[in-house]
Image: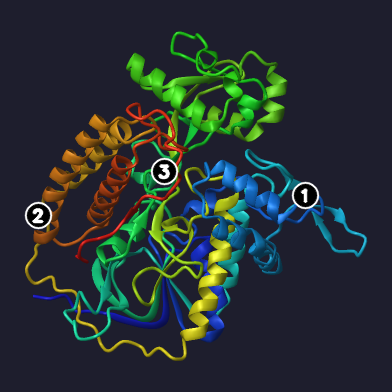
Amino acid sequence: MMNENREHQCDVLVIGSGAAGLSLALRLAPLGKVIVLSKGPRSEGATYYAQGGIAAVFDESDSVDSHVEDTQIAGANLCDEDVVRFIAENAKHCVQWLIDGGVPFDQEGSGSDGSPRYHLTREGGHSHRRILHAADATGMAVQTSLQDNVHQHPNITVLERHNALDLITNQKLGRLHQPNRVLGAYVWNRNREAVETVRAKFVVLATGGASKVYQYTSNPDVSSGDGIAMAWRAGCRVANLEFNQFHPTCLFHPDARNFLLTEALRGEGAYLRRPDGSRFMLDFDERGELAPRDVVARAIDFEMKRLGADCMYLDISHKPADFVSKHFPMIHEKLMTYGIDITKEPIPIVPAAHYTCGGVVVNQSGQTDLEGLYAIGEVSYTGLHGANRMASNSLLECVVYAWSAAESIADQINSVSLPDELPGWDESQVGCSDEEVVIQHNWHELRLFMWDYMGIVRTTKRLERAMRRIQLLKDETHEYYSNFRVSNNLLELRNLLDVAELMVRCALKRKESVGLHYTLDYPEAAGDPHPTILTPDQPC
């Protein structure tokens, strides 16, 4: 017997409630009804936890050309230069839109005309000070401001604890005589534990990245690659999923799964040590602890694998206690709650998956290969990041593509009709599972072997092992999905398995080491920079 189907209708369905999704919703709300899906509480996404800032040319001594050049260098020349310039040129007015909306970026006085002068910081890879920030919690300031504005707009409905299950298209419904187009989505309402239908003129994926595919990640639990997997199943191309950025120092503690330890600790003299207390970074790079992020992450990973150790250690206890507590008060206080006094003892750390540089292929308006479907933010592959993301370009990409996608949708919104009534989700052939342990086991197995085989350092043999295990888990999960009612863990596992396969396929195609992709079998760059693009054989 089928559950009673509940249907929603809107002009634009936005899947994801971070900076990209909320920015687009606010821009389009004056033109029609917008529904925003949030997997958890609306603030629970990568945006909220972003500490750094947003890169934009606000200083007269800086230039768009310089921003473009810095981004290309950081991306190992795999960036699309036209896209990089497009984003850099539109950065200032998009950031100004955030300011006008109430984001409280730090200021340092005012200019000669009385306008605010913003405090700009400089981060790794940038040749100028161009990072606007709100102390060390920029993401929280941006997310909070956008949420406040969304809450006040009558045309925007935010549905919390709603997972997008799959996209609905003409082709999936067997309407082969009609051009293929996205019509909406099936949605798992976790509040009533039922699948509902959303009909929409346009669907926008703003679901973030896929770092939850790894055992250690700095990302919140919602980062499970949902948008990438749904777009792939709907027939869209993906690109550059071999490039996964790892932060070198994440706290290793059972009660703190995603607490980052700022690189400023190493900047102020912290050492990286083995479990026996010996330093190791000088064995890998003459710059020691101040080597670039990817070098440090690889060194830590190498030592952990060589020694069979669970973690390495970050140690600043040789500095005066008052120096440490003054420079790092938040970290000091936070770690004391876990029984770690950083003024007296080293901190257990591991590298952690941090950012997905590839994703769903889009054009400069955020349009995917499927008519009516857009993808913006970390879920997308725009060409901005290339083989490595430069600091503070990620939030910028979110707000620029929210603007460009909104412009594209606004041009069409009155000429596109709401789809006809859609069939409800059929649960007549499935039952309730009494074997949830299968999902938990497969979940843990996936994250562990992806960390070991598709992590910071790779080999062809490791990647092939990962692919064999992915196929086995996909077979088991597909059987489970076909026989039992959906659940949050099942949906996320299904999506992560799809994305894990795409990541490994991309990595196997790239026969070189460049940027974030490092393989022992091909340790040198090939000298022919190009993206890795995968095309689905058939939507499924």
Earlier-in-chain disc, 1 versus 2: 1
Pick the front one: 482 or 489: 482
530 w.r.t. 315: above or below: below
User: From the image, which quarter does the C terminus lie in?
Assistant: bottom left
Nearer to me, 130 or 86 = 86
Labelled disc at residue 387:
none
Q: Earlier in the sequence, mark 3 or mark 1?
A: 1
Percent position (x, y) of residue 234? 27, 67
Between marks 3 and 1 in the image, the one whose residue lies nearer the viewer: 3
Q: Is residue 466 left or right of residue 389?
A: left
Name the quadrant of the N terminus: bottom left
- Residue 119, label in figure: 1
Alpha carbon of mark 3 to alpha carbon of mark 2: how far?
A: 31 Å
Front residue of 267 and 318: 267
In the picture, the disc for residue 243 is: 3
Amino acid carrying mark 2 in the image:
Glu
